[in-house]
């Protein structure tokens, strides 16, 4: 298998936009191509993530749509849908296409538009990623899924609402340093704890926002990447799945797909959790960050809440998590999120993250979770 | 029964729910229990399912109170959902009924209650 590098990244500002998801992707892709210093004619394939385009934009066939709007209509495209992990799944398959020697330069990315519909509508569409026969008829929502996880974690380990609030406060502090973030303002523990319950024990400020946005990455084979100024190498990329039904998950306080994907990615990369300098992980809800830090092996099971409260995951702490502001503050355009997390880690490893730079970051990890924890992708990145 | 069919389809399961009965699949090869529909036993990969009636008694493993609902359920808020661990060992998500929201807790014993939400039969749990 050939080595693969990320040689270009581009991300739109996340938040409210009056453009289609294809237009948002095209802006990010243009920035990624400029960053890579390769012409659009070099692109041999597009791997694309988009989730609810069929519902919010009445748009299927979003792969060729995105390629057409970018202006590369002839390249083969494939659209990936693994709920909120879609563009991370797209990334993993693009890595395999280059590693296998099929292509030398591949464009990866994703985009989502949801703020053109009401919160009640988007809540319904996101719930489509849970089981339509068993769970949707009960009125299950995504905050509801993670509220069930939060309650189980609190019961088993004594995790507190204040510890979850500490995740939100930390990610907003980081997001205030990111000009692309949807929320660039700091918040306090009191504001989180006083916000209204959405799905007990999760409150409004425990939840990431609905967002529009796009992200893109240019991937290249080693031969092409060697001509680039700062290639960031893909050290490993792994996916794992778990049961769809919440009732079938054996222990709601854990996410086995995170543990499996992390083990496979660490094995591919030949590194362990202690070797990682910076992490972008899937904090769709504050409890999701706590459980992910445990599943990735950064902390023991049950220790994630205390670690967040003690500042161990802050910029300047022992293992900075979500320096971009995470999904919580940067925003979560679901089809774009995986690619946007990778763009942040590449920027960190290049040493180009400005005020949110993790000093000396050499090895980085991205973790993206799909929907009801039934899909997880983990990738590892490093420099020469 | 065709060899490629699960002995209990999703539709058949919910028809039994409407009639007041929770049903599981028991593997005739290794004894694993599963909630239908399921083709292969995840434990031994045999296809030897037999339907078994569940007693419908269990305890709350985790719960939440939904206050922001999808459109179709907006008129129901606030409502409680719980993952219930049944006495036989399998777990199911259900809507809690006739239990005051402030009384809901992990470990609370509950009993299966057939529900119809928006014309669809679905799983509910009430006081034991």
Image (cartoon, coloured by chain):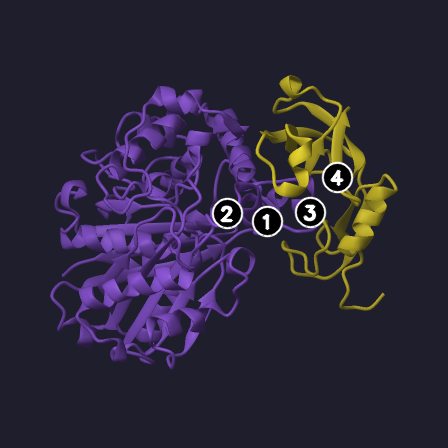
Marks 3 and 1 close (CB-CB < 8 Å): no
Image disc number at residue B123: 4
Task: Find out whether the residues at labels 3 and 4 contact each other: C-beta distance under 8 Å.
Answer: yes
Left or right, A30 with reference to A163: left
Mark-to-mark CA distance, 4 and 1:
16 Å
In the image, is residue A40 above or below residue B19?
below
Picture coordinates of residue A274 (x, y %)?
Answer: 25, 44
* Residues beneath discs 4 and 1 located on the same chain: no
Circle 2 chain: A
Q: Position of residue A300 (x, y in %)?
A: 37, 35
Give the residue pinned by disc 1. A130
Label 3 neighbourhood size at 10 Å, few (<14), some (14-19), many (20+)?
many
**Would you place residue B52 above or below residue A35 in this image?**
above
Kindly report the distance in space between the C-alpha atoms of the residues bearing marks 3 and 1.
Answer: 9 Å
Mark 2 against mark 1, which lies toward the viewer? 1
Q: Which residue is at 56% across, 51% downward?
A: A129
Which chain: purple? Answer: A
For disc 4, the chain is B
Calculate the distance from the C-alpha at mark 3 to the C-alpha at mark 4. Answer: 8 Å
Residue A271 in the image: state x and y as whole percent: 26, 53
The letter of the yellow chain is B
Q: CA distance from mark 2 to mark 1?
A: 10 Å
Residue to which mark 2 is pinned: A373
Location of residue A299 with respect to B42 vertically, above or below: above
């Amino acid at each position: 298998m050939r080595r693969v590098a990320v040689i270009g990244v581009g991300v739109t500002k996340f938040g409210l936009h009056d453009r289609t998801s294809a237009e948002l992707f095209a802006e990010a892709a243009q920035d990624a191509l400029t960053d890579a210093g390769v012409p659009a004619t070099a692109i041999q394939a597009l791997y694309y993530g988009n989730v609810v385009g069929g519902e919010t934009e009445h748009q299927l066939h979003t792969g060729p749509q995105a390629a057409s709007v970018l202006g590369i209509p002839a390249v083969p495209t494939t659209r990936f849908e693994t709920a909120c992990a879609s563009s991370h799944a797209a990334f993993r398959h693009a890595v395999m296409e280059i590693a296998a020697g099929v292509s030398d330069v591949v464009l990866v990315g994703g985009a989502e538009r949801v703020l053109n519909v009401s919160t009640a509508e988007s809540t319904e569409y996101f719930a489509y990623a849970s089981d339509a026969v068993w769970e949707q008829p009960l009125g299950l929502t995504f905050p509801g899924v993670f509220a069930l996880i939060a309650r189980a974690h609190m019961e088993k380990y004594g995790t507190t609402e204040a510890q979850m609030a500490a995740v939100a406060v930390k990610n907003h502090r980081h997001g205030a340093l990111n000009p692309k973030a949807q929320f660039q303002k700091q918040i306090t523990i009191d504001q989180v704890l006083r916000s209204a319950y959405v799905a007990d024990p999760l409150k409004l400020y425990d939840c990431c926002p609905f967002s529009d946005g796009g992200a893109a990455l240019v991937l290249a084979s080693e031969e092409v990447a060697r001509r680039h100024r700062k290639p960031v190498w893909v050290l490993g990329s792994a996916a794992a799945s778990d049961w769809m039904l919440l009732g079938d998950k054996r222990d709601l306080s854990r996410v086995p797909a995170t543990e499996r994907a992390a083990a496979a990615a660490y094995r591919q990369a030949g590194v362990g959790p202690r070797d990682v300098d910076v992490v972008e992980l899937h904090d769709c809800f504050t409890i999701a960050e706590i459980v992910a830090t445990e599943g990735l092996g950064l902390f023991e099971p049950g220790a994630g809440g205390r670690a967040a409260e003690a500042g161990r995951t802050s910029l300047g702490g022992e293992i900075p998590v979500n320096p971009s502001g995470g999904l919580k503050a940067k925003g979560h355009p679901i089809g774009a999120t995986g690619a946007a997390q990778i763009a942040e880690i590449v920027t960190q490893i290049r040493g180009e993250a400005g005020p949110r730079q993790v000093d000396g970051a050499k090895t980085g990890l991205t973790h993206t979770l799909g929907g009801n924890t039934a899909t997880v992708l983990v990738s590892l990145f490093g420099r020469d | 029964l065709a060899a490629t069919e699960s002995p209990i389809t999703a539709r058949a399961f919910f028809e039994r729910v409407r009639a007041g009965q929770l049903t599981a699949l028991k593997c005739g090869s290794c004894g694993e229990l599963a909630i239908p529909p399921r083709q292969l036993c995840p434990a031994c990969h045999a296809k030897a399912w037999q339907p078994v009636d569940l007693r419908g008694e269990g305890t709350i493993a985790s719960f939440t109170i939904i206050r922001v609902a999808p459109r179709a359920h907006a008129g129901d808020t606030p409502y409680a959902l719980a993952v219930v661990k049944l006495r036989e060992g399998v777990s199911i998500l259900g809507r809690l009924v006739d239990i005051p929201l402030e009384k809901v807790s992990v470990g609370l014993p509950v009993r299966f209650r057939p529900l119809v939400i928006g014309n669809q039969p679905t799983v509910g749990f009430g006081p034991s």
